[in-house]
Image (cartoon, rainbow, N blue to C red):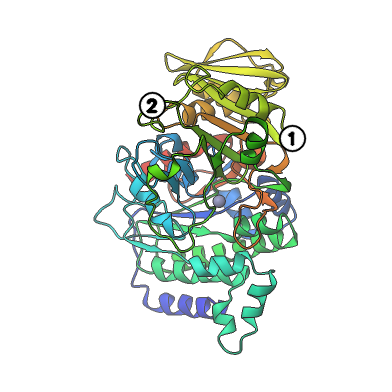
């Protein structure tokens, strides 16, 4: 929406003020791919006046801890339910469901995004479902089960994501229609605001808004000057949205400014399927990155008969391996823990340890014992009586020795968060256990080294990305969180998990 239209709406609503309401309500404003360091730098230099003023009058979390894998959509879950993402029943934006006869690769990127809501466990309600009689609304979210009014700007996001590519640039030059067909990143975010103003005029009890382009552009181009400019632009749009809500008389509306993950730059793309083919002659498939045309996830499991394993990419800095067990009738169904079950299990880990571009490998001994390892050492995570024990042999792959970490001691989840939130891998022990403690968990998880991703020749239009997320490193796992509203005191918290922010937001509405 152009600014003059927004201003006109402000004038109109000031005159009638018909929406004045004291109902307690929440607006979630998610800035996709908000990198903590860039946010802090721009805020310090006065480039984010709206967000800075919110930080100074509300709750500010300096190190918000997101979900692992640090993924779009999947990481929305804790904010909406107050529960960790590993309780969602899904395992990222892509995962392999062993229990199905067809559509085992659950890939929510592209037209198949509608399956994410369907696949969520029914155990936890979303905040939309908690208020079934109220008007609720969302923009650009495919994890929004229960929302009354869901809008997605898919085409605009696609053209804006690739707006520097020549064939999309040519579209804009088509007379009259070009500007409508081709939307750049700045216009895309203005379209988001446009929709948000329309929805908020109906006073939604819960309003979810995703500003998507920081994430989208960073994947394709890496970090460039547009990142800062777009963030400044989004800051100004958030100000228009909040001002409009105030003019409408929504005196009890709360605003949560959150993110799903940070981002990191990628200079080299590798393909673990090729590495394992060359070393162990394993036949592994990774599926398509995006379901551009195909809506239905219906590939029958019989078509995977010739494979040794399936590889699934998230973000593209985390990857999952699922082995087909040998000699069993329903051979994909069983989770594999070691070489007794799958003979090449240990050799696979060894090959991955010796491959350039892989930071570490995660595998489990059982649903409560997991190991994170690299060539120099192994860290064993044991979950005992609702507490965690972390035991190392060799050098700690997570580098916690510099935190004076109490190895071998039984620690609660809260103690672990306090001990590790400022480290290179914040909250990693709890997050790894969460991901690996289910029947449906992957057999092996791998995280790429700084500067690498797992998506060689994988992406549509550009083949290889120049930036990404998904991993355990603090660049991706740590995001700023801000909350303002009549029930919120001014406070700075050094750290908070996204599910605890979610609990706080649900409590505000109760
Ligand atoms: Zn994202």
Query: Which residue lies under the disc numbered 2?
Result: 328
Seen from the viewer's position, the closer of residues 216 and 148 is: 216
* Relative image position of residue 316 (x, y in whole percent): 61, 46
Q: Please report the residue visible at 62 percent of the width from the left and 28 percent of the height from the top.
A: 361
Of callouts 1 and 2, the N-terminal one: 2
Q: Few, some or many C-alpha atoms within 10 Å of disc 1 (few <14, some 14-19, many ≥20)?
A: few
Q: Please report the residue visible at 48 percent of the width from the left and 72 percent of the height from the top.
A: 194
- The answer, for residue 189, to whether it is visible in the render is no
Instruction: Point out the image quarter for the C terminus.
Output: top left
In this view, the residue farthest toward the left is 133
Q: In what element is the residue under mark 2?
A: loop
* Relative image position of residue 415 (x, y in whole percent): 54, 21
Q: Few, some or many C-alpha atoms within 10 Å of disc 2 (few <14, some 14-19, many ≥20)?
A: few
Using the image, tell me which numbered label, if any, was put on residue 87: none
* Residue 133 shown left or right of residue 116 in the figure: left
Q: In what element is the residue under mark 1?
A: loop
* Residue 89 shown left or right of residue 463 in the figure: left
* Relative image position of residue 344 (x, y in whole percent): 57, 24
User: Disc 1, disc 2: CB below 8 Å?
Assistant: no
In this view, the residue farthest toward the bottom is 175
Q: How many marks?
A: 2
Above or below, 23 relative to 279: below
Above or below, 364 relative to 197: above
Query: Which residue lies under the disc numbered 1?
Result: 356
Q: Please report the residue visible at 41 percent of the width from the left and 28 percent of the height from the top.
A: 438
Q: Nearer the viewer, mark 1 or mark 2?
A: 2
Cα distance, mark 1 to mark 2?
34 Å
* Relative image position of residue 149 (x, y in whole percent): 34, 63
Above or below, 149 relative to 329: below
């Amino acid at each position: 929406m152009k600014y003059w239209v927004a201003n006109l709406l402000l004038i109109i609503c000031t005159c009638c003020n018909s929406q004045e309401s004291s109902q307690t309500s929440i607006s979630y404003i998610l800035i996709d791919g908000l990198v903590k360091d860039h946010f802090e730098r721009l805020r310090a230099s006065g480039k984010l006046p709206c967000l800075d003023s919110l930080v100074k009058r509300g709750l500010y979390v300096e190190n918000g801890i997101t979900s692992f894998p640090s993924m779009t959509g999947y990481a929305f879950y804790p904010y909406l339910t107050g529960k960790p993402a590993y309780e969602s029943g899904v395992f990222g934006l892509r995962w392999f469901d062993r229990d199905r006869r067809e559509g085992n690769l659950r890939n929510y990127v592209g037209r198949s995004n509608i399956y994410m809501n369907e696949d969520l466990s029914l155990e936890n309600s979303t905040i939309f479902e908690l208020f079934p009689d109220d008007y609720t609304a969302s923009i650009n979210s495919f994890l929004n089960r229960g929302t009354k009014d869901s809008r997605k700007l898919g085409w605009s996001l696609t053209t804006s994501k690739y707006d520097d590519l020549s064939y999309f640039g040519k579209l804009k030059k088509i007379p009259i229609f070009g500007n409508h067909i081709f939307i750049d990143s700045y216009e895309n975010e203005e379209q988001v605001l446009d929709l948000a103003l329309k929805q908020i005029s109906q006073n939604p009890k819960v309003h979810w808004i995703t500003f998507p382009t920081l994430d989208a552009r960073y994947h394709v181009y890496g970090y460039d000057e547009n990142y800062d400019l777009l963030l400044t632009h989004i800051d100004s749009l958030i100000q228009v949205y909040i001002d409009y809500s105030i003019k409408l008389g929504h005196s009890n509306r709360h605003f949560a400014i959150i993110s799903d993950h940070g981002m990191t730059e990628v200079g080299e793309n590798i393909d673990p399927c090729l590495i394992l083919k060359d070393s162990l002659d394993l036949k592994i498939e990774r599926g398509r990155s995006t379901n551009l045309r195909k809506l239905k996830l219906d590939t029958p499991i019989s078509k995977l008969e010739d494979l040794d394993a399936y590889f699934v990419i998230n973000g593209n800095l985390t990857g999952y391996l699922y082995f087909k067990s040998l000699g069993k009738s329903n051979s994909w169904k069983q989770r594999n823990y070691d070489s007794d079950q799958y003979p090449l299990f240990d050799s696979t880990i060894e090959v991955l340890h010796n491959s350039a571009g892989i930071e570490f490998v995660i595998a489990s001994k059982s649903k409560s014992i997991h190991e994170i390892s690299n060539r120099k050492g192994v860290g064993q995570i044991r979950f005992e009586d609702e507490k965690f024990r972390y035991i190392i042999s060799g050098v700690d792959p997570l580098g916690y020795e510099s935190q004076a970490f109490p190895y071998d001691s039984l620690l609660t989840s809260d103690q672990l968060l306090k001990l590790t939130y400022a480290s290179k891998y914040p909250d990693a022990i709890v997050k790894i256990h969460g991901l690996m403690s289910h029947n449906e968990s992957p057999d092996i998880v791998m995280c790429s080294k700084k500067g690498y991703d797992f998506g060689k020749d994988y992406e549509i239009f550009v083949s290889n990305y120049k930036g990404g997320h998904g991993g355990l490193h603090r660049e991706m796992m740590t995001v700023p969180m801000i909350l303002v509203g009549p029930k919120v005191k001014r406070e700075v918290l050094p750290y908070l998990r996204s599910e605890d922010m979610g609990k706080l937001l649900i409590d505000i509405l109760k």
